[in-house]
Image (cartoon, helix red, strand yellow):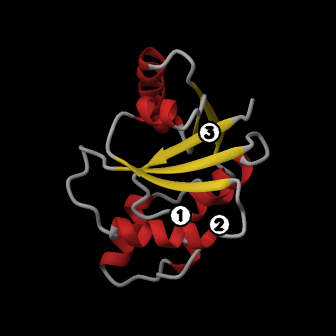
Amino acid sequence: MKKIALFPGSFDPFTRGHHDIVLRGLNLFDEVIISIGHNTTKKNRYFDIELMVDKIETLYQANPRVKVVLYNELTSSLAKKHQANYLLRGLRNTTDFEYENTISQMNRYLNENLETVFLITSPQFAAISSTIIREVHRYGGNVREFLPYEI
């Protein structure tokens, strides 16, 4: 049976830290599906969702083991649709763990076959967050170093 992992998030934007998690996830899984969700707690995206899909698909176009999907449903339901038994998540700090642990427990409740695998962020990416990148970009700062593609 193929080991398929969903890597869910809003990816607004998709950062070098996210890219690192995907690359490391490919050492563990046969396939990684980057799942861009519509987060109900984040009312307005900063970067257009179609732009992010295009940038991410282009980034991985030479790797058939990486796919990109948009979704607007429970992550646990999406996992069933794609026969994914794993969720891949990156952790930068203990605050991330507290947040992700709660989500992991609910996903496991909703889909008992779904395991969450946490990867600790590589040190050089630990300070990168989509929120900070959006803020720097909004005020004209250079974010090129933090993104694995050109904006």
x 49%, y 62%: residue: 14
Label 2 close to label 3 by CB (< 8 Å): no
Tag 3's secondary structure?
strand
Under mark 3, the amino acid is: Ala
**Extreme-right residue of the structure:** 27
Marks 2 and 1 sit apart, C-alpha to C-alpha, by: 14 Å
* Residue at which label 1 appears: 15
In this picture, is 126 found above or below 91?
below
First reached walking from the N terminus: tag 2 or tag 1: 1
x 24%, y 44%: residue: 40
Image quadrant in which you'd find residue 87 = top right
In this picture, is 142 found above or below 24?
below
Tag 1's secondary structure?
loop
Q: Residues within 10 Å of mark 3 (few under 14, many from 20)?
A: many
* Residue at which label 3 appears: 5
Marks 2 and 3 sit apart, C-alpha to C-alpha, by: 16 Å
The front one of 43 and 130 is 43
In this picture, is 126 found above or below 82?
below
First reached walking from the N terminus: tag 3 or tag 1: 3
- Label total for image: 3
- In percent of width and height, residue 100 lies at 47, 32
Name the disc covering residue 133, or none.
none
* Residue at which label 2 appears: 60
Image quadrant in which you'd find residue 86 = top right
First reached walking from the N terminus: tag 2 or tag 3: 3
Under mark 2, the amino acid is: Tyr
